[in-house]
Image (tube, coloured by chain):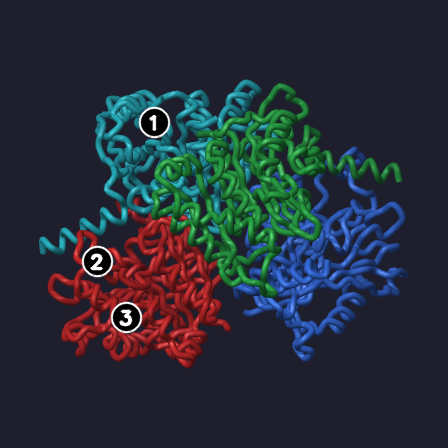
Chain colours: A green, B blue, C red, D cyan
Amino acid sequence: MKHFFLLAVAMLLTCFGANAQSKFVTDTIYSEILGSPRAYTVYLPASFDKNPGKQYPVLYLLHGLYGKNSDWQDMSQLKLIADKLTRNGTIDEMVIVTPDAHQGLPNSQPGYFNLPEWRYEDFFFQEFMPQIEKKYRIIGDKRHRAIAGLSMGGGGTTGYCQHHPEAFAAAYPMSALMSIPLDRRSPSPNSFDDKLTKSCLENDCVEFVLNADEATKQALRTIDWYIDCGDDDFLLDCNLAIYQAMRDNKIPAQLRVRDGVHNWEYWSSALYDCLPFVNRSFKK
Amino acid sequence: MKHFFLLAVAMLLTCFGANAQSKFVTDTIYSEILGSPRAYTVYLPASFDKNPGKQYPVLYLLHGLYGKNSDWQDMSQLKLIADKLTRNGTIDEMVIVTPDAHQGLPNSQPGYFNLPEWRYEDFFFQEFMPQIEKKYRIIGDKRHRAIAGLSMGGGGTTGYCQHHPEAFAAAYPMSALMSIPLDRRSPSPNSFDDKLTKSCLENDCVEFVLNADEATKQALRTIDWYIDCGDDDFLLDCNLAIYQAMRDNKIPAQLRVRDGVHNWEYWSSALYDCLPFVNRSFKK
Amino acid sequence: MKHFFLLAVAMLLTCFGANAQSKFVTDTIYSEILGSPRAYTVYLPASFDKNPGKQYPVLYLLHGLYGKNSDWQDMSQLKLIADKLTRNGTIDEMVIVTPDAHQGLPNSQPGYFNLPEWRYEDFFFQEFMPQIEKKYRIIGDKRHRAIAGLSMGGGGTTGYCQHHPEAFAAAYPMSALMSIPLDRRSPSPNSFDDKLTKSCLENDCVEFVLNADEATKQALRTIDWYIDCGDDDFLLDCNLAIYQAMRDNKIPAQLRVRDGVHNWEYWSSALYDCLPFVNRSFKK
Amino acid sequence: MKHFFLLAVAMLLTCFGANAQSKFVTDTIYSEILGSPRAYTVYLPASFDKNPGKQYPVLYLLHGLYGKNSDWQDMSQLKLIADKLTRNGTIDEMVIVTPDAHQGLPNSQPGYFNLPEWRYEDFFFQEFMPQIEKKYRIIGDKRHRAIAGLSMGGGGTTGYCQHHPEAFAAAYPMSALMSIPLDRRSPSPNSFDDKLTKSCLENDCVEFVLNADEATKQALRTIDWYIDCGDDDFLLDCNLAIYQAMRDNKIPAQLRVRDGVHNWEYWSSALYDCLPFVNRSFKK
């Protein structure tokens, strides 16, 4: 068996090179605001350990409803795709952070925005970002910070940029829950969790654009936007609506409607566009 | 929690439709030839259970060295991609079978070809194919049967078509071990398993083409070939060599060199080309 | 110079093969309905001349405002793309017809629909299609006839399928003038030709879907639809509107919003999707 | 008709914006070395005229045998694609120069390298580049200068980088004449022009790599290489050969074999990869 193991190692070294590798790290931070520990997963690029003085740009990548911090690691090809795009020069090395907004309250998935009993957005900006950016040597300014996410995390992506436009250079919401679809606002078999519904309606991303004053619009224009949603996605309409609202208010954005539904094939393949897009913003 | 569970079910039904779904089935058949049970995994398209009289074309999809029957299910997005391409009309429903050639002999991975103590190719054609094609309602003629595979399974794909050109309409080897690279033929840290090396040299796919007589070439021309290998793959050269040999002998083939190395990002993304390619052969 | 010419010919033969080639033919038919001759251009696949008994499926491909029958030949890579997709097996040979709706009335571009003084739609279905399909050996049934077009021709594509759903298997409108945008309905620097505006409002494609009765919807469902429009196209909204109307009325359609504006880069690259899409409909 | 003209202008302004536009300029410079004037065509980005103090990176883009300076303007979608990639942020503005090596000697197309009676390479580096880079406000250092070209121009691209590695940051040869294929070296109907054959054999790009000393290899490694050739191209083998030679000598390069032959569909679509590739080199 030892022979066998050596062969396997030799093959791995041959295939992937004996150089430093990128890796995922999973850890936990304790949140005073939420009164509990929160897990997170971080993709660290290949040079991270051997260049202890180097600082990196960062992409925050948010999971969806019923998801958790390890989803992007487990369900998409995030590491393989980031490694490939780095290797062929399409992107520069970056740190990618996937936080956890899983089941914050008993039997409830209240999502990324603040509720009186679940101040997740406060946690994110006041505790999570500062600690993560210190621990993982993030450059830490607007020009080198981006955010993306799927479904509920696409809504979080958009809402966080709307509330904190000074924080991010680029936003890439995927299949985003930009607002609660009309047919899910009243109780029905299709309804979301009550607290999530309440939270999303209070932070409706489409309404935010429609009601923005000129200073707010000007702030939104400092972010590079890319809205990506499948043609058969049940959330398509709110993604079209926010794109139209942004365009009509002269807030530039990319829009893509690719073939697809609300699943990991769409989100994994979106990374081929998302990572180069945020990388270009980092290099402006 | 019941409320929570219902919500989750409702959401799944909403996202994916309440209709019949495709699925993976894993099972085992006993091989008299190998003297042991062999596992396999099958992708059954959405209509399979509700149309008990319908017959399907089949794609055999082979794993690589150190792999096993469940690799395509676990490591690639096979189900999501097959579902998507079926839904958008790019492919028709097909059954996809992923057999197991894992660790056939103690501490050895002898691969897809016959050795005296490991008659896997005999097993495949004499036991596996007949039983699978009966059990899963496969049409079962050359025109509706294709084969693909990665690395060692790409060599298996090519060798099986060379030995049994009457069996397959299309072949799509990925990053294929078409022959043992020269620098791995003598003992070295990079060497493969001795039995695999012996087996692959006896069934060298490039030599087969170079030595083919006219009748053999004519038989190879009845198969649609698609050779796909990454530019940074350590097996690139033998893939280029077989393409050049086939072209020079007027055996038509597609060749693609995409960006990539020897990993699952390459093989999962290859399915977007592989499935439509074999589907076109089925519809000729 | 003769030496030089021979070299050039030898090189062409080497590059492209000495076999029969596809070609464009331009000709004219006299329309009794319009009281004038109308030009057209036809792409004939490579086998057309040497297989005088063979019949083909047909794609009608419509030009836009201020365009003419030769636009697809001159401005896009139609021939190169059709040849490539045929050569690699993605599509079967088809005849592609590009009619002419250029400047029908003095100083006016009234488009593809009937006006009292410009009965182009009558000409198309009563004179053009029957004569073309006889002359160029078109199979001539619904299952082997498709239509596509850009801008005003995308509106024509959609309207023709709405008025004659029995005629076409597939429709691929590109950047389509599905209706006159609101800000162009009253006189303004952006207004279209008056007659075109009148004609398009009378044949508003979005309104047609919204007002369709169940039998009409059922007829529209017999066509494979693919709506393709750029994210920065000034006609995006009416394309999103018709997709949403069709989806809400359970008329299946593909939607793609790719990066782009209202120009030939978009339309030429659309052919990579359009030709395989209509080919799949031909093969159902 | 004036009304009609205004409409057309209004539509153009609407579609394309009233802002400054990119444009092609064609001009001539007199070459003392060649003893004759040589034409060229330049793509100037949208900001060129309005920012008279701005300097730009430059891409030299070479035509093929029997081609001329206006080929890229006339036969590809260079302007549309460069405009699109600039507009969506994939590339920064650059100047693209297409020189002319057309029929340099009576009845002969001697190509891009020096012959006693046709010192084109000397002209290019001693006269053309200096004058062009001054006239069109090119930054003019290695880091902001790239070269690409098709067929004979792909050989020119590679040879110029081999002879002048200090001059270019990136090279993107397409379907390149890296050396004269063996079956065209002796007189035959397939032979190239005698002078071209002589010139290419003297400047064989594959041999150059195979014979390079360590200092030369080190110089070649300062260039970003991207080799792109169709699977059905008659020049495929010499492109594979140079890639293999470079890889074996640890000169990093990208390789792509896409579906295609030796034609403008391949070269026009290559621009979607070529322009972002050279742009990334400019931004390192």
Compared with residue B39, is residue B284 higher up or lower down, i.e. above or below?
A: below
Q: Of marks 3 and 2, which one's residue comes earlier in the chain?
A: 2
- The reply to whether callout 3 and callout 1 are in contact (CB within 8 Å) is no
Q: Name the residue under label 2.
A: C66
Q: Mark 3 points at which residue?
A: C203
- Tag 3 subunit: C
Q: Mark 1 points at which residue?
A: D56
Q: What kind of residue is marked 3?
A: Asn
Nearer to me, D57 or C171: C171
Please tell me whether mark 1 sits on a helix, a strand or a loop.
loop
**C-alpha span from label 2 to label 1:** 36 Å
Crowding around mark 3 (Cα neighbors within 10 Å: few <14, some 14 to 19, many 20+) is many
Compared with residue C209, is residue D31 higher up or lower down, i.e. above or below?
A: above
Place of residue C153 in the rendered image (x, y in percent of width and height, measured from the top left): 30, 63
Nearer to me, B152 or D55: D55
Q: In which quarter of the image is residue A137?
A: top right
Compared with residue D117, is residue C108 higher up or lower down, i.e. above or below?
A: below
Q: How many marks?
A: 3
Q: What residue appears at the point 25 percent right and 25 percent down from the top-left corner?
A: D52
Place of residue A25 in the rendered image (x, y in percent of width and height, measured from the top left): 70, 34
Crowding around mark 2 (Cα neighbors within 10 Å: few <14, some 14 to 19, many 20+) is some
**C-alpha span from label 3 to label 2:** 19 Å
Crowding around mark 1 (Cα neighbors within 10 Å: few <14, some 14 to 19, many 20+) is many
Please determine if labels 2 and 1 lie on a single subunit: no
Please tell me whether mark 3 sits on a helix, a strand or a loop.
loop
Q: In which quarter of the image is residue B92?
A: bottom right
Quadrant of the snapshot with the N terminus of chain D: bottom left
**C-alpha span from label 3 to label 1:** 49 Å
